[in-house]
């Protein structure tokens, strides 16, 4: 099963949940843990793996051979992102805008364009006990997280359970990380901010057709509106973690919850079992695995 | 007119509560919520929307199956794996238009995406520009740029002193878009190992774009040892730590009551945020 752990709002304890789940499961079996929060990867602070492999992620950026180019302007015309411009017998390339789609090089009538890789981040692999960690890291100053997330997800194993730590928010990096998972756990806190961001995250997973459940962290700090909302929306609240200075203190020192307070291990194992049960209900993505994505979810994201 | 962007790396460090308090403390300002995919500032400022605009951005390919002869070329060239069985998965499609360009029978059209909304509102603290990115949409960077542009416009028209920006989490496209060209970044961190790691990355980003930064440690007393470590780290980096705010549940209570914390309570948190704004504004207007 591929389980993604997300939260509309940052700082709700997503990484705490993802690492605790992985550690609890790893007592018995091998587990894969993917850190897809490539802008701020924090999983390894808790897992402390030994990195055994590290490689760069590139996106292909066009490079023009001025000797072949006749400045016809075709490349600029086809680029959807204005990443290439032809002015005064010069072809200008703006690597920050380029998505590496390959249209310009393919369509250049003079075959004047080749591509060269621009490094935008790295992927690292490591182990800690039974956990295999794969994490992506966006290079400072680079804009595009999704290609790194895609690269991390290429390592998804179909032999072990897979847990994905997702970045906060609801935009493209979040979608890229959640896409293809069998269940999405949404971590929130019982405050108006937590509720607002949870409701946005719920819209995302629904759009993607992925079943979800909620973990309420720091229960006791705010109000009861998150539970009310989950009840109305028919979303199961699968775990509640109280506001507890001991938990906060372990977290601040990078100690995973299940190591700091071992009685939590059983609760996380149970949480996982419960999720697995929900994720295999008839009609769920996991039960349909094998069908192509196009057949499974062809919901339109556009307004038209 | 000076612009300060409040950032935090991962979010959840109390950034929005601090921005809302600045809204109550600062004279002559416009507020901009650039956390466009999880905008929360409006919950504390209770805006009255004056203008609502659609945000159209990017495109999605669409295949007309009547015209398609199933040659498969589009699937072959698409680098985002968005076409399968002559169907476009709109969520994976990046709108590059490559398939549209090469389809031999013109079976593909590109359709514009309605990617969200942006608003100009009035609050009792002054104007607020905010936005809502559509679900699962791209181009948050562009929407952020639009929000900032309009905030700047309002500041210029009204001859306002400050633009106070609530920034998005992370260090990627939306953050870069909210940071570039700003006068100052205020980084809100917390004394946890993850908070420290995130701070390091955001600080590096500020340096990369040449934006001066100040640091505020929120909830500093949840781990004082880590707080001291952040202070010495910042000293090494020659970045000033301008404020240490203690943990106090009044911040959440204020939130539940829909008020900026400085208007809700009179304790130490209020005092610290008051001092923080004083230091930020001094730095902005030397
Ligand atoms: S399409 Fe090719 S030949 Fe035309 S301007 Fe671009 S690089 Fe030059
Ligand atoms: S690869 Fe695509 S995005 Fe990049 S310049 Fe060429 S056409 Fe534009
Ligand atoms: S390139 Fe055009 S004709 Fe060929 S499979 Fe794609 S849509 Fe159909
Ligand atoms: S527009 Fe680009 S990303 Fe979208 S389906 Fe066509 S080739 Fe793929």
Image: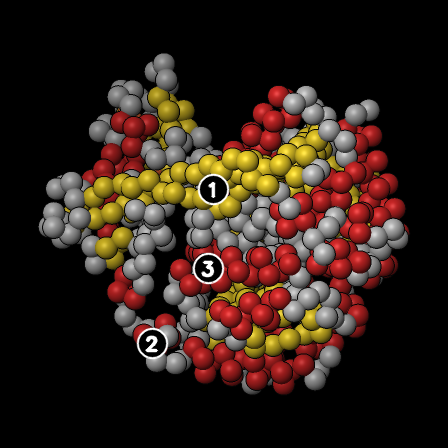
Q: Which residue is mark 3?
A: A203
Near-viewer residue (A162 or B154)? B154
Q: Is residue B158 left or right of residue A79?
A: right
What is the CA distance from the residue labelled 2 to the residue labelled 1?
34 Å
Near-viewer residue (A117 or A291)? A291
Near-viewer residue (B41 or B232)? B41
What is the CA distance from the residue labelled 3 to the residue labelled 2?
19 Å
User: At 39% from the left edge and 34% from the top edge, which residue is drawn?
Assistant: A81
What is the CA distance from the residue labelled 3 to the residue labelled 1?
16 Å
- Report x, y in % for residue A229: 55, 67
Q: Secondary structure at mark 1?
A: strand
Taking the view exactly as shown, the residue that stands out farthest to the top is: A88
Q: Is A233 rendered above or below residue A82?
A: below
Q: Is A246 rendered above or below residue A38?
A: below
Task: Tell me, yes or no, if residue A95 can be seen here.
Answer: yes
Q: Are marks 3 and 1 on the same chain?
A: no
Q: Which residue is mark 1?
A: B117
Q: Which residue is mark 2?
A: A283
The answer to which image quadrant residue B257 occupies is bottom right
- Report x, y in % for residue B167: 63, 43
Q: Quadrant of the N terminus of chain B?
A: top right
- Report x, y in % for residue B74: 22, 48
């Amino acid at each position: 099963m591929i389980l993604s752990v997300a939260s509309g709002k940052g700082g709700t304890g997503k990484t705490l949940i993802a690492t605790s789940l992985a550690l609890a499961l790893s007592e018995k079996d091998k587990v894969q843990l993917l850190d897809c929060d490539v802008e701020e990867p924090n999983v390894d602070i808790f897992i402390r793996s030994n990195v055994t492999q590290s490689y760069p992620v590139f996106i292909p950026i066009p490079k023009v051979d001025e000797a072949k180019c006749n400045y016809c302007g075709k490349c600029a015309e086809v680029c959807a992102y204005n990443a290439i411009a032809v002015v005064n017998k010069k072809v200008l390339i703006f690597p920050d805008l380029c998505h590496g789609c390959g249209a310009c090089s393919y369509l250049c009538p003079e075959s004047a364009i080749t591509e060269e890789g621009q490094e935008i981040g790295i992927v690292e692999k490591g182990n800690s006990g039974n956990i295999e960690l794969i994490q992506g890291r966006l290079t400072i100053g680079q804009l595009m997280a999704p290609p790194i997330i895609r690269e991390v997800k290429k390592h998804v194993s179909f032999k072990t359970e897979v847990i994905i730590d997702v970045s906060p928010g609801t935009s493209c990096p979040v979608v890229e990380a959640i896409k293809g998972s069998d269940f999405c756990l949404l971590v929130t806190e019982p405050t108006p901010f937590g509720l607002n961001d949870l409701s946005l995250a719920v819209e995302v997973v629904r759009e993607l057709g992925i079943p979800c459940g909620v973990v309420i962290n720091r229960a006791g700090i705010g109000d009861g509106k998150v539970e009310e909302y989950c009840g109305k929306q028919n979303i199961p609240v699968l775990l509640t973690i109280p506001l507890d200075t001991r938990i906060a203190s372990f977290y601040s020192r990078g100690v995973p919850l299940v190591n700091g307070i071992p009685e939590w291990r059983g609760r996380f194992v149970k949480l996982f079992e419960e999720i697995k049960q929900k994720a295999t209900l008839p009609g769920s993505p996991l039960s349909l695995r094998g069908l192509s994505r196009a057949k499974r979810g062809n919901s339109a994201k556009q307004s038209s | 007119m000076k612009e300060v962007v409040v950032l935090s790396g991962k979010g959840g460090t109390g950034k929005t509560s601090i921005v809302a308090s600045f809204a109550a403390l600062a004279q002559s300002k416009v507020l901009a919520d650039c956390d466009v995919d999880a905008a929360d500032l409006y919950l504390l400022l209770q805006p009255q929307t004056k203008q609502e605009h659609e945000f159209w951005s990017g495109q999605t390919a669409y295949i007309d199956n009547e015209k398609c002869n199933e040659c498969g070329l589009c699937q072959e060239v698409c680098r985002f794996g968005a076409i399968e069985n002559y169907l476009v998965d709109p969520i994976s499609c990046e709108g590059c238009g490559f398939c549209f360009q090469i389809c031999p029978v013109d079976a593909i059209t590109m359709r514009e995406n309605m990617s969200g909304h942006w608003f100009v509102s009035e609050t009792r603290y002054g104007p607020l520009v905010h936005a809502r990115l559509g679900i699962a949409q791209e181009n948050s960077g562009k929407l952020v740029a639009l929000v900032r542009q309009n905030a700047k416009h309002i500041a210029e028209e009204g001859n306002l002193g400050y633009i106070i920006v609530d920034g998005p989490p992370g260090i990627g496209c939306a953050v870069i878009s909210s940071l570039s060209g700003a006068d100052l970044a205020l980084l809100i961190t917390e004394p946890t190992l993850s908070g420290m790691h995130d701070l390091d990355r955001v600080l590096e980003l500020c340096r990369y774009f040449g934006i001066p930064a100040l640091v505020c440690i929120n909830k500093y007393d949840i781990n004082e040892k880590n707080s001291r470590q952040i202070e010495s780290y910042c000293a090494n980096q020659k970045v000033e730590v301008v404020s240490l705010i203690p943990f106090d549940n009044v911040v959440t209570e204020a939130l539940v009551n829909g008020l900026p914390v400085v208007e809700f309570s009179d304790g130490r948190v209020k005092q610290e945020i008051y001092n923080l704004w004083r230091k930020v504004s001094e730095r902005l207007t030397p």
